[in-house]
Image (cartoon, rainbow, N blue to C red):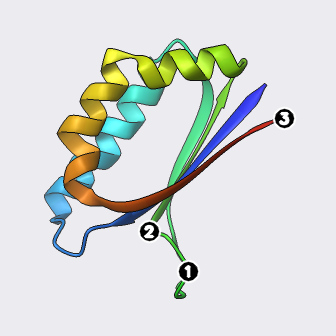
């Protein structure tokens, strides 16, 4: 099993409508992907200079499933249509569980 964790910081000028569209796109992509075994998406409720705004934790059967997910047309469309517009920076890590 592989766990994929993404921490996102949003652009200061991202509108609430854009952020809601981003959240909806992430959830829909994870729900409809055959590769995603389970996922959670949540907003940061803390504050601090090194905090991010949102976290995605998604589990995959294995590394090949994860690579297939990242290479999929759905993920590429999500990046082009949503992430590029609202995400200022992100941190990601994948590890075996």
Residue located 31% across and 16% down the image: 73
Q: Say few, some or many: other residues with alpha carbon within 10 Å of mark 1 (under 14 / 14 to 19 / 20 or more).
A: few
1 and 3 marks in contact (CB < 8 Å): no
Establish if 61 lies above or below 2.
above
2 and 3 marks in contact (CB < 8 Å): no
Going from the N terminus, do you reach mark 2 or mark 3 first? 2
Going from the N terminus, do you reach mark 1 or mark 3 first? 1
Mark 1 → mark 3, Cα distance in angstroms: 26 Å
Q: Secondary structure at mark 1?
A: loop
Q: Secondary structure at mark 3?
A: loop
Q: Quadrant of the C terminus?
A: top right
Disc nearest the viewer among 2 and 1: 1
Q: Quadrant of the N terminus?
A: top right
Q: Which residue is mark 3?
A: 97
Res 50 label: 1
Mark 2 → mark 3, Cα distance in angstroms: 25 Å
- Report whether 8 appears left or right of 35: left
Establish if 67 lies above or below 92.
above
Q: Say few, some or many: other residues with alpha carbon within 10 Å of mark 2 (under 14 / 14 to 19 / 20 or more).
A: some
Establish if 83 lies above or below 67.
below
Residue located 61% across and 15% down the image: 65
- Report whether 25 appears left or right of 3: left
Q: Which residue is mark 2?
A: 53
Residue located 67% across and 31% down the image: 59
Between 92 and 82, which is closer to the camera in this rendering? 92
- Report whether 53 appears left or right of 1: left
The spot of residue 45 in percent (x, y) is 53, 75
């Amino acid at each position: 099993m592989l766990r994929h964790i993404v921490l996102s910081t949003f652009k200061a000028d991202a509108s609430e409508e854009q952020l809601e569209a981003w959240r909806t796109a992430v959830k829909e992509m994870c729900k409809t992907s055959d590769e995603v075994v389970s996922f959670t998406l949540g907003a940061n409720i803390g504050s601090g200079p090194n905090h991010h705004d949102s976290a995605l934790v998604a589990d995959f059967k294995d590394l090949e499933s994860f690579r297939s997910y990242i290479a999929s047309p759905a993920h590429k469309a999500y990046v082009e249509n949503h992430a590029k517009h609202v995400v200022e920076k992100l941190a990601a890590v994948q590890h075996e569980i």
